């Protein structure tokens, strides 16, 4: 039997939702992860420090007794975000980052930013105080093909923003293209990228071949195979600019299996098994710890976790539920389409 022991991992991009869904999913994150950056795209979104404090309280209340898990809170950037409130949130230790959703880019992003000029005062303040900006890197204009939206965002929004504010620390979240990987590698400083579990495993065929498969639909949408290969190389290279952000995003099945299904893939429960498989396949198990447990805290200026987890490779496949049942309804679990043999030892 093979096994590998690594520092306890963190998830640098997670959707926990609220209410019954939060209660139904949180244990799947707190089981394997020490901390997670919590996305603020609730309805209504988490826009002020006060909202974030209240949301953090609800997360802590939903946490299974005895689990140690630290939610790292973010604010949802709007054109009206108050720079003083953001600074107060950082100073108090509550706020780890601010999230930029271009308006209309994804789930609950209609309150996001349309005109980046209007958000400049807060972005300038963040650059000054060293608070990272997490970016959903897609343009939303209807004339840009959905498979090109990340590359066009880099060229027309992100690069100009970084030139205007070189001191701003930017996390390009859920990178899905070789263009994104190359752009991050080309930056000298103040730019890093998170990569999801599923984008290391699927390309766009998973969504469209043999029928439309809504449980592989997420945003940014999975791209062509050569993009997936570039993501795999970046993640397994050990390069400190790349780290895990699962973007695990639960939606109940009726909202995905319908005429206009929601974007989001639920991976919290089996991410570590999937990652061990991917890293082993690429002969990079010795770099799994960098990707899942070391590079993220270094980027965010946080201590690495002292606790360890052990992954063991079992002869028989490890079984995960096809769906989890939550108080909000059933949520389908990501199916990597290969048997998983790696398991986190409990
Ligand atoms: O697939 C996604 N789901 N991408 C996002 O950016 C948002 C997320 C969600 O909140 O459902
Ligand atoms: Zn997300």
Image: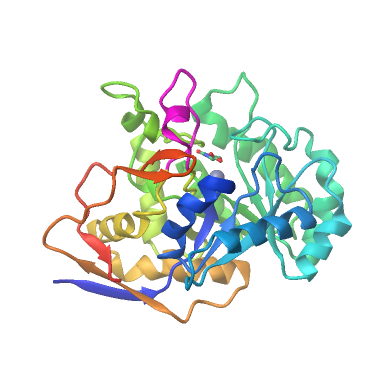
Q: In the drawing, does residue 187 fall left or right of residue 21?
A: right
Quadrant in which the N terminus is drawn: bottom left
- Magenta span: predominant SS is loop
Residue located 63% across and 57% down the image: 58
Q: Where is residue 169 shown, x and y percent of the image?
A: 68, 59
Residue located 26% across and 63% down the image: 343
Q: Where is residue 67 shown, x and y percent of the image?
A: 47, 70
Q: Where's ligand 2: which quadrant?
A: top right
Q: Where is residue 287 shown, x and y percent of the image?
A: 35, 68
Q: State the count of labels.
A: 0
Q: From the viewer's perspective, is residue 274 above or below residue 44?
A: below
Q: From the viewer's perspective, is residue 69 above or below residue 116?
A: below
Q: Which residues are magenta?
A: 250-265
Is 112 inside the magenta-drawn segment?
no
Q: In the drawing, does residue 204 fall left or right of residue 242?
A: left
Check the image and name the residue furthest to the left: 315
Quadrant in which the C terminus is drawn: bottom left
Check the image and name the residue furthest to the bottom: 306
Q: Where is residue 297 shown, x and y percent of the image?
A: 55, 70
Q: Is residue 246 visible?
A: no
């Amino acid at each position: 039997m093979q096994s590998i022991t690594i520092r306890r991992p963190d998830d640098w991009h997670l959707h926990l939702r609220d209410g019954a869904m939060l209660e139904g999913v949180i244990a799947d994150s707190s089981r394997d992860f020490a901390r997670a950056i919590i996305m603020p795209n609730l309805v209504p979104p988490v826009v002020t420090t006060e909202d974030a404090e209240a949301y953090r309280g609800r997360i802590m209340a939903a946490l299974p007794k005895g689990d140690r898990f630290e939610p790292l809170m973010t604010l949802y950037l709007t054109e009206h975000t108050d720079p003083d409130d953001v600074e107060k949130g950082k100073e108090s230790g509550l706020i780890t980052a601010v999230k930029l959703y271009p308006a209309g880019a994804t789930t609950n992003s209609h309150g996001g930013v349309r005109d980046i000029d209007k958000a400049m005062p807060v972005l300038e303040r963040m650059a000054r105080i060293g608070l990272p900006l997490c970016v959903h890197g897609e343009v939303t204009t209807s004339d840009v093909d959905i498979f090109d939206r990340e590359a066009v965002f880099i060229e027309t929004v992100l690069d100009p923003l970084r030139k205007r504010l070189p001191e701003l620390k930017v996390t390009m979240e859920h990178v899905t293209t070789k263009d994104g990987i190359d752009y991050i590698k080309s930056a000298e400083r103040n730019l890093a990228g998170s990569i999801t579990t599923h984008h290391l495993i699927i390309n766009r065929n998973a969504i469209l071949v043999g029928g439309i498969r809504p449980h592989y639909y997420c945003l940014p949408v999975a791209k062509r195979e050569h993009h997936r290969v570039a993501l795999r190389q970046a993640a397994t290279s050990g390069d400190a600019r790349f780290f895990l952000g699962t973007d695990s995003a639960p939606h109940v099945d009726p909202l995905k299996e319908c005429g206009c299904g929601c974007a989001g893939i639920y991976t919290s429960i089996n991410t570590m098994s999937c990652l061990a498989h991917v890293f082993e396949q690429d002969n990079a198990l010795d770099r799994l710890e960098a990707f899942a447990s070391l590079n993220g805290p270094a980027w965010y200026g946080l201590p690495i976790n002292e606790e360890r987890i052990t992954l063991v490779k079992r002869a028989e496949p490890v079984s995960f539920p096809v769906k989890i049942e939550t108080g909000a309804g059933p949520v389908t679990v990501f199916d990597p389409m290969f048997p998983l043999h790696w398991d986190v030892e409990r």
